[in-house]
Amino acid sequence: MSKIFLTDTTLRDGSHTVSHQFNPDDVMKVAAALENAGVNLIEIGHGDGLTGSTINYGFSKYSDFDLISAASSVLTKSKLTVLLIPGIGTVEDLEMVRKCGAKAVRVATHVTEADISEQHIKAAKDMGLFTVGFLMMSHMASVERVTEEALKMESYGADVVYVTDSGGAMLPKDVAAKIGSLKKNLKVPIGHHAHNNLGLAVSNSLTAIEAGATYIDGCLSGLGAGAGNTPTEMLIATFDKMGYEHDGNLYKAMDASEDVLKPIVEGKGLKLKTNSNSLMIGYAGVYSSFMLHAQRAAARFGVDARDILMELGRRKAVGGQEDWIIDVAYELAHK
C-alpha cells in the first residue's frame, strides 16, 4: 500500500460553514495546529476559491491574499495550498498568492470542462507550484468521461488529478469505478475529495484508497459545504486502524478540532459539534459508557483520558469492568 497524503480544507471548504468569516488570526491558529498534526497540504482561502469573495458567492471580511500571507507566516513543513476555479480566479491572482507564500494550487473545473484548466495548470507549473487537477461534481459524468477529462489535466502537467464528489452524491461503487479507471489510465497520482451528504464520506474515502487513490481530503470536525467534508480526525483514525502509511497524528488532530477550531467557530456565534468522544471510543474499541468514567479518572490522576481508553482497548475491557479505569489511570500516572 502506497503512502497516503492528507489535504485539509478547513480553511477553504470549511469557510462555507462560517460564511467565509475566518480572519488572519483564525487562519494562523488553525494552520499551525494542522501542521502540528502532520497534515501534508493545508488549503486556504474563500470557499469558492481565489477571489471568490463576491456578491454571487458571499463576501469575506478579508482578502485571500491576507489570509494566505497569515498562513504562510506559521507554516514551515505543510504545503500551503489554494483552490482556483478558472473564471473566478486568474493567472494573475495565482502569481500574487505565490508571492504571498502558496506552494500548491488545485485548479478546479466542472467534471466535463477540463479544457478550461489548461492555461492555469501550465502557468502554475511554470511558477513552480505543486499543481492538482480537481474535477468537481464527478458524479455527473460516466467513468469514461471522467477518465477522458482527467487525461487532459494530466497532459497539461497536473501532478495529481482528483475525482471530486462536490455534491456528496457518489456511492462507494461509483468511487471505486472512477478512481479505478483513473488509476489504470493515468501515470500521475489520484486523489479523492468527499462530502458527507449521504453519510458516506469516510467510507468513500477508504474505497478511493482501495481503488488506488493516494491523496485524500478532510476538514476538522467535518466542516464544509452541504453536510460537510470527511472529518480529518476520523480519516487519521481510520488510516491508523487500516495500517496505512501516513503522517497524521490522531491526538493532535483531535486537539486541533476541539481546542483550536471549536472556540473560533463558536466565537462567531455558531455551534460546532465535535466528535472527539465518539471517535475515541470507536478508535480504542471500548464500551461507550467508559468515556465519562475515563474523563473523571484522567482529571483525578492528571493523565490523558484518551490514553486510558487506549489501554482499556488493549486489555479488551468490556462493560462491567469499569473498575479497571481507575487501575489504568493510576498506572499511567506512575509511569
Image (spheres, helix red, strand yellow):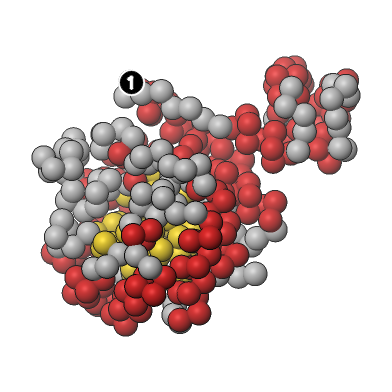
Q: Is residue 202 above or below residue 4?
A: above
Identified by mark 1, the residue type is: Gly
Residue found at x 53% / y 56%: 172
Q: Secondary structure at mark 1?
A: loop
Residue 31, image x, y percentages: 41, 45
Percent position (x, y) of residue 225? 34, 41
Picture quadrant of residue 30: top left
What residue occupies the far front of the structure in this picture? Answer: 142
Vertical placement of residue 60 versus 103, above or below: above
In the picture, residue 315 is in which quadrant?
top right
Q: Nearer the viewer, residue 112 or 26?
A: 112
User: In x, y percent, where is residue 278?
Assistant: 63, 31
Please, which residue is most extreme toward the left here? 55
At 46% across and 68% down in the image, what residue appears? 178
Residue 64: horizontal and vertical position, in percent? 22, 48
User: Does the image show residue 77?
Assistant: no
Say which residue appears at 50% left-offset and 79% top-offset: 184
Q: Quick check: 114 left or right of 334?
A: left
Residue at the image position 33 percent from the left and 68 percent from the top = 133
Residue at mark 1: 269
